Image (cartoon, rainbow, N blue to C red):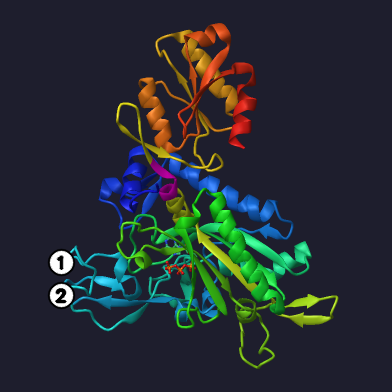
């Protein structure tokens, strides 16, 4: 049973230290969020899983970490300066401002029971385009209006990969197909942010650009669509909460030949099934658009484009066929924050104990769990027991994230660990001092097993793997 709605995760996150509203003591900042002690561990584990799967487990993908602020020309030639915009509408009645294609995500300020446009009093203007790139200035400038110093915070990590295409090729000397992976912050001045960490103005992306021969692109695109569904399921997300969405010709970005979104059921509370889904990730066939537009060539084979500013040609020379061409690129792009939200929603479970009390269990996979094991003393006033528990924690820590907690009765301590997804609790009791053994409790079954201290690390490693 996943979380019934996003609100359930918002309150769990705040209560347990996953995610807090940003700038809270100053009244907050619309849709900005800070990641607490558990949230940062969970996000790091998601990023590690993605990186391991793409960069370490394969031998055709390498990493990159490019700058957030690039030369403005990057965004001129990529097309973002002219096309990276959302359709914005104002409501003359409530004075609200909304993104036309996301009205469903927000409530009408005057009539919260309906979405903007749904009440007879709503009076929406015609849509106009609003560029969502954040502007800034670089260096000491006379005024913010100084256009020569204008720069942008990147709205996606992908362009950093494209403009480094030749740099990396020259050092890695790979043959097609190959990929470049990057994780980093991206910024979009979203018209309608909201739904907790689903849509924010500052977020983190995991993007991989996979360069292929043009004729291989459709097949390899499909392979990544299939592959990513498997990776997402490996995070513990159930099949029944995932679906695919094929973008229509009208929805496709101007550079894309085909884009398939992997959708997650973020809104299970909505009555109509088709309104329950929203995008978790997009997997696009971006054709050779990006490498071409950043290339210095005065014009391409079709005489299409001129880039007078670039100093490099980002084409690829195939030594076997003696052909020079621009590779196509397949781009699986996923947000860390949206993944974290989907993971938490799917892991959320409620279970009733023998006293009839409802307990929350976050059934995170051991790979993602922020804490792998909690060591708990049964008698916190007995130094022999607390010292032994603290020592066990220290001994476990190098191989797994372990914590010690003696701030409550054992029932409360177990409940706390269940709620944050800790797969195992280790309890040290009076008997432990005699038999050199501890009790290991399983988060999901609540079953307990006596394990000797000597074999504890090995036992836990095995069950966590
Ligand atoms: P949407 O249609 O929801 O605005 P998008 O199609 O513009 O998203 P992409 O440009 O494909 O998004 O970005 C790739 C991924 O980055 C998305 O699938 C999502 O996981 C994440 N992402 C994009 N925008 C945001 C945002 N404002 N907040 C959080 N994550 C985001």
Q: Is the C-beta separation of discs 1 and 2 under 8 Å?
A: yes
Chain part drawn in magenta = 344-349
In the image, is residue 363 part of the stretch drawn in magenta?
no
Helix, strand or loop at mark 1: loop
Check disc 2: other Cα within 10 Å, few if <14, some if 14-19, many if 20+. few
Which is more N-terminal, label 2 or label 1?
2
Find residue 458 and report its horizontal and vertical position in percent: 65, 26
Residue 36 against residue 446 in the figure, above or below = below
**Neighbours of disc 1 within 10 Å: few (<14), some (14-19), many (20+):** some
Work out whether residue 162 can be spotted.
Answer: no
Measured from the top left, where is residue 456 in percent x and y?
A: 60, 22
Residue at position x 48%, y 20% in the image: 427
Q: Nearer the viewer, residue 252 or 352?
A: 352
- Which quadrant of the figure has residue 120? bottom left
Q: Determine the secondary structure under disc 2.
A: loop
The relative height of residue 185 versus residue 393 in the rendered view (above or below) is: below
Name which residue lies at 61% across and 84% down: 307
Is residue 340 in sight in this rendering? yes
Q: Residue at x 53, y 8 (%)?
A: 433
Residue of label 2: 93
In this rendered view, identify the residue nearer to me: 315 or 93.
Answer: 93
Q: Position of residue 67 (x, y in %)?
A: 56, 61
Q: Which mark is residue 110?
A: 1
């Amino acid at each position: 049973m996943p979380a019934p709605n996003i609100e359930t995760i918002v309150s769990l996150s705040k209560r347990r230290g996953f995610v807090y509203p940003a700038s809270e003591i100053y009244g907050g900042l619309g849709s900005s969020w800070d990641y607490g002690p558990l949230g940062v561990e969970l996000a790091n584990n998601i990023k590690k899983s993605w990186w391991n799967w793409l960069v370490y487990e394969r031998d055709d993908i390498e990493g990159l970490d490019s700058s957030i602020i690039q030369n403005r020309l990057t965004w001129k030639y990529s097309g973002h300066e002219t096309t990276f915009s959302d359709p914005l509408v104002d409501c003359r009645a409530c004075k609200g401002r909304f993104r036309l294609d996301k009205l469903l995500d927000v409530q009408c300020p005057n009539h919260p029971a309906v979405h903007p446009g749904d009440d007879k009093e709503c009076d929406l203007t015609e849509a106009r385009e609003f560029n969502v790139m954040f502007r800034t200035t670089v260096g000491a400038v006379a005024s913010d209006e100084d256009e020569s110093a204008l720069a942008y915070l990147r709205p996606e990590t992908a362009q950093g990969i494209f403009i480094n295409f030749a740099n990396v090729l020259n050092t890695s000397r790979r043959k097609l197909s190959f990929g470049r992976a990057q994780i980093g912050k991206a910024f979009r001045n979203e018209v309608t942010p909201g739904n907790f960490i689903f849509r924010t103005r500052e977020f983190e992306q995991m993007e991989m650009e996979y360069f292929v021969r043009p004729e291989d692109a459709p097949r390899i695109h499909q392979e990544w669509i299939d592959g990513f569904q498997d990776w997402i399921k490996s995070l513990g997300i159930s099949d029944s909460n995932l679906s695919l969405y094929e973008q229509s010709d009208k929805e496709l970005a101007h550079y894309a030949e085909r884009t398939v979104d992997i959708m997650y059921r973020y809104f299970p509370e909505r009555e109509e099934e088709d309104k329950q889904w929203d995008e978790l990730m997009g997997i696009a066939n971006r054709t050779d658009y990006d490498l071409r537009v950043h290339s210095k060539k005065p014009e391409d084979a079709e005489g299409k484009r001129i880039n007078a500013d670039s100093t490099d040609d980002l084409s690829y020379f195939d030594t076997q066929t003696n052909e020079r061409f621009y590779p196509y690129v397949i781009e699986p792009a996923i947000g860390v924050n949206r993944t974290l939200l989907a993971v938490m929603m799917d892991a959320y479970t409620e279970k009733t104990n023998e006293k009839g009390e409802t307990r929350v269990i976050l059934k995170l996979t051991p790979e993602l769990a922020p804490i792998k094991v909690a060591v708990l003393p049964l008698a916190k006033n007995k130094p022999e027991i607390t010292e032994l528990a603290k020592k066990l924690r220290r001994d476990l820590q190098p191989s797994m994230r372990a914590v010690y907690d003696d701030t409550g009765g054992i029932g409360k301590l177990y409940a706390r660990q269940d709620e944050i997804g800790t797969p195992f609790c280790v309890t040290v009791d009076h008997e432990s001092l005699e038999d050199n053994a501890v009790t290991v409790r399983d988060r999901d079954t609540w079953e307990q097993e006596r394990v000797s201290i000597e074999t504890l690390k090995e036992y836990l490693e095995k069950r966590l793997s």
